[in-house]
Image: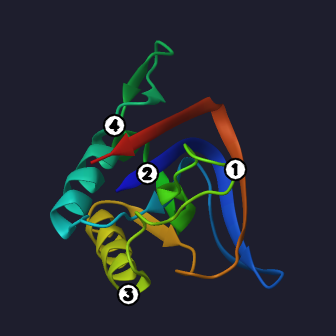
Amino acid sequence: MKLVVQRVKSASVTIDNKLYSSIKNGFMVLFGVEKGDTIDKAEWLAQKLVNLRVFEDENKKMNNSILEVGGEILVVSQFTLAGNCKKGTRPSFDSAEEPKKAEEIYNEFCSILSRSIAVKTGVFGAMMDVALVNDGPVTFILEK
């Protein structure tokens, strides 16, 4: 399981030229599921994410979690995170989980997060226009 986490001032998902969801201050998370990933991994990553201290404190140090700053999270499924570009010029997606199981894990990850923080999502498997204003820029890759 792989997450690309960006600290944002704002982020949104538009589908078919209609705004689907948006957040202000918080995290924009691109979420990829690989074969062998489990709900337990999703639980671990969700806890890691909400406790990640990457928001500035009063001394301008990254010392606060998203919970402490009252942020929101926008989670967008992105199977291309499982892409392997090591060989040739066309990515291989052999390690990507099959869609039904990946969607189950994605939904559970969002559900786990929503127990402690406001969560917005994209639509699993949809073509989406994703926009964001990266704050910093601050970007991390979390894997389990």
Q: Position of residue 47 (x, y in %)?
A: 23, 50
Toward the top, the furthest residue is 59
Q: Is residue 25 left or right of residue 107?
A: right
Instruction: Tell me which label, 1 or 2, sits earlier in the chain.
Output: 2
What whole-number distance in Å separates the C-alpha atoms at marks 1 and 2? 23 Å
Mark 3 = which residue?
100
Instruction: State how far apart marks 4 and 1 are (Cα).
Output: 35 Å
| Label disc, if present, on residue 52 of the rendered structure | 4
Residue appearing at x 26%, y 67% in the figure: 112
Residue highlighted by disc 2:
3
User: How far is disc 1 from disc 3 in space, using C-alphas?
Assistant: 28 Å
- Label 3 vs label 4: CA separation? 29 Å
Q: Are marks 2 and 3 in contact (CB under 8 Å)?
A: no
- The image shows residue 20, relative to residue 8, as above or below, that is below
Q: Position of residue 85 (x, y in %)?
A: 58, 48
13 horizontally vs 79: left or right: right
**Mark with earlier residue (2, 4):** 2
Labels 1 and 3: the sequence-earlier one: 1
* Display coloring: rainbow
Q: Position of residue 142 (x, y in %)?
A: 38, 43
Query: Does dot 1 land on a helix, a strand or a loop?
Result: loop
Element carrying mark 2: strand
Between 69 and 112, the one nearer to me in the picture: 112
